[in-house]
Image (cartoon, grey):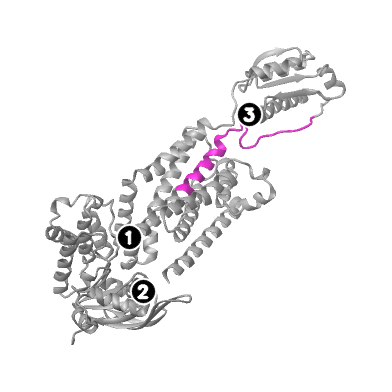
């Protein structure tokens, strides 16, 4: 035990004396959270829109008032004909035009259906999409209100309801996402680099010749990163909660336990990489290309898995990060307990065991 | 030589697939001697040494190091030996003191022992003022001497030195060999691999490996007589040519 503590102390010296490690460990999580939180966002606020009201009746006025009252939109101007649309889009200030058909109110009562057209400037597809969704939401909301008071109900084409994240806040996706990316980065990349570093310097050989057994060497190398990863996860959750108002509906204990499980998964991947790679460079490339890219692209962090082509959807299943994101979203947003996420948890445990067994096998081959 | 055997190697072989790296070698090393283990690159000397220090398993044959079997008692072997690799084997980003504390610690020395050893070691090497300096800032010659002293921290019965003087200037090499002599005089067995044939002259006995086999094993003096040449370099060249 004393040997082990000495080993860990040495490992912390390495980490604290290396500026690059310190930056990745403590600078990156905060920088990423801030970046995703403030810069990269799908939310819209005070978007300038124009209204083309061909009907000009009391119902359209109610809807317009509703739109103008929301904080998402600002009615920049009212236009009189479709021919103006092109020119106001070209000026760039107005991002969307909401058009009410002729006799909107009348159609609503007779045909029980009123038509509203939303034209958006899709040069920025994300914003265009969000504007459409928000406008839709306002219209649906209006129809619901009307139906409450009317005996004779109007038809509703679609019903949109936004559970768990009614304001469609980006923060709810990126806090779990950033946490996953950072834990992967710190645990897998940093450990694989730190182990290959010893191989490169020749000190690994000296350690293997010492009475320390290989397992102690690996555990000694890995332990500091478990500790630092836990700190990182805590910092990210705290920032998410206190800076961005991310809720934690479920149990903190479960969140912590699942995070530690994922840290171990990532560490076992790091160990596996360090068994294959001989140099720090290779270890870093393998971690970045083999782990980071899939985590960012295929885990559902940025791009929804359900809209991927089938082969990619299937591949996404072997990415541990996908399961972890499902787990922490369920805990934080839905307040899920273990009986809801046991399947995902088992998958993560299974993957971890697989990576550890594979590492042990590889390690033996290397010692032969 | 009528001395106590400290390393006994019998019919030791190591195969990697079809390639035979070490082919049925047998030799003994006696307590307190400086044993030179020579061979060209790829002759198998590093592989043979790795089996003796317990980090590579023999395909067949057996070896006893400090009376422990390298196959079944690798842990005991590791406790009884010191090792210094050809690549400088300390941590550049740790100070001299931290390095000594770390390596003393993994060999199970107590805090007091480490303190004592540290003082003794830096006094002998004249590094008192550099105790809290990072090892990376030291000149290579000093690093190597320090590395050797650290390999001896736990007072091993045998020290394995894998090309310890690579890239060091002749004066430092000379000083390094003086340290080796002093240690051997205390009864520690020195097992050293080297490329430098002039260093082979300093050994009590040398073995020369060619293509996985030990082709010659005797004192430098006897070997020179046997091959009728003036230097170990010529002995080495003659042996290597014969094989070709």
Relative to A57, say whether B92 is above or below: below
Determine whether, in the image, residue A91 is placed left or right of residue B11.
right
What secondary structure is found at the residue carrying circle 2?
loop
Residue B79 vs residue A89, the one in the foreground: A89
The magenta segment is A156-185
Residue displayed at 70% across by 20% down: A97
Residue A113 in which image quadrant: top right
Residue displayed at 51% across by 60% down: A355
Residue A19 in which image quadrant: top left
Relative to B240, say whether A17 is above or below: above
Disc nearer the start of the sequence (1/3): 3
Q: Is residue B210 magenta?
A: no
The residues bearing labels 2 and 1 have C-alpha atoms spaced at a distance of: 21 Å
Assign the N terminus of chain B to one quadrant of the image.
bottom left
User: How many neighbours does mark 2 have within 10 angstroms: few (below 14), some (14-19), or many (20 or more)?
Assistant: many
Q: Are marks 2 and 1 in contact (CB under 8 Å)?
A: no
């Amino acid at each position: 035990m004393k040997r082990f503590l000495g080993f860990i102390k040495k490992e912390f010296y390495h980490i604290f004396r290396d500026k690059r490690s310190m930056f990745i460990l403590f600078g990156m999580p905060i920088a990423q959270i801030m970046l995703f939180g403030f810069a990269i966002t799908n939310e819209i606020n005070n978007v300038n829109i124009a209204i083309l009201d061909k009907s000009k009746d009391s119902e359209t006025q109610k809807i317009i008032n509703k739109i103008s009252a929301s904080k998402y939109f600002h009615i920049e101007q009212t236009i009189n004909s479709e021919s103006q649309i092109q020119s106001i889009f070209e000026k760039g200030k107005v991002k969307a035009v909401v058009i009410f058909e002729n006799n909107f109110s009348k159609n609503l009562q007779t045909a029980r259906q009123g038509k509203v057209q939303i034209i958006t400037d899709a040069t920025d597809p994300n914003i265009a999409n969000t504007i459409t969704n928000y406008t839709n939401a306002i219209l649906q909301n209006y129809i619901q209100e009307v139906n409450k008071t009317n005996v004779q109900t109007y038809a509703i084409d679609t019903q949109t309801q936004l559970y768990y994240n009614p304001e469609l806040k980006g923060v709810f996706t990126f806090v779990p996402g950033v946490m996953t990316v950072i834990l992967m980065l710190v645990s897998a990349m940093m450990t694989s680099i730190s182990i290959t570093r010893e191989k490169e310097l020749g000190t690994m050989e000296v350690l293997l010749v010492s009475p320390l057994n290989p397992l102690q060497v690996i555990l000694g190398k890995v332990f500091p990163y478990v500790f630092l990863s836990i700190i990182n996860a805590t910092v990210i959750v705290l920032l998410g909660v206190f800076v961005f108002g991310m809720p934690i509906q479920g149990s903190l204990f479960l969140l912590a336990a699942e995070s530690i499980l994922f840290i171990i998964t990532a560490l076992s991947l790091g160990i596996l990489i360090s068994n294959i790679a001989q140099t720090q460079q290779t270890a870093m490339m393998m971690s970045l290309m083999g782990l980071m890219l899939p985590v960012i692209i295929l885990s559902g962090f940025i791009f929804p898995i359900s809209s991927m082509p089938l082969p990619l959807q299937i591949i996404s299943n072997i990415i541990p990060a996908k399961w972890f994101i499902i787990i922490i979203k369920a805990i934080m947003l839905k307040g899920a307990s273990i009986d809801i996420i046991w399947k995902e948890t088992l998958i993560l445990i299974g993957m971890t065991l697989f990576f550890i067994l594979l590492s042990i096998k590889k390690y033996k081959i290397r010692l032969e | 030589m009528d001395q106590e055997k400290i390393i006994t190697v019998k019919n030791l072989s190591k195969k990697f697939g079809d390639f035979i790296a070490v082919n049925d070698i047998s030799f003994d090393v006696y307590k307190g001697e400086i044993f030179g283990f020579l061979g060209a690159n790829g002759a198998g000397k590093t592989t043979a040494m790795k089996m003796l220090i317990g980090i590579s398993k023999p395909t067949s044959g057996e070896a006893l190091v400090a009376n422990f079997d390298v196959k079944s008692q690798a842990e005991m072997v590791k406790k009884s030996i010191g090792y210094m690799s050809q690549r400088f084997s300390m941590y550049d980003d740790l100070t001299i003191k931290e390095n000594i504390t770390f390596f003393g610690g993994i060999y199970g020395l107590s805090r007091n022992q480490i303190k004592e050893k540290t003082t003794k070691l830096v006094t002998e090497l004249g590094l008192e003022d550099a105790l809290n300096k990072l090892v990376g800032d030291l000149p290579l010659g000093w690093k190597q001497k320090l590395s050797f002293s650290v390999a001896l921290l736990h007072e091993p019965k045998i020290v394995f030195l894998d090309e310890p003087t690579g890239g060091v200037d002749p004066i430092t090499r000379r000083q390094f060999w003086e340290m080796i002599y002093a240690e051997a005089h205390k009864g520690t067995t020195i097992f050293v691999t080297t490329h430098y044939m002039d260093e082979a002259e300093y050994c009590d006995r040398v073995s020369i490996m060619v293509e996985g086999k030990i082709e010659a094993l005797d004192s430098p003096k006897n070997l020179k007589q046997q091959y009728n040449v003036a230097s170990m370099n010529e002995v080495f060249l003659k042996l290597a040519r014969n094989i070709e």
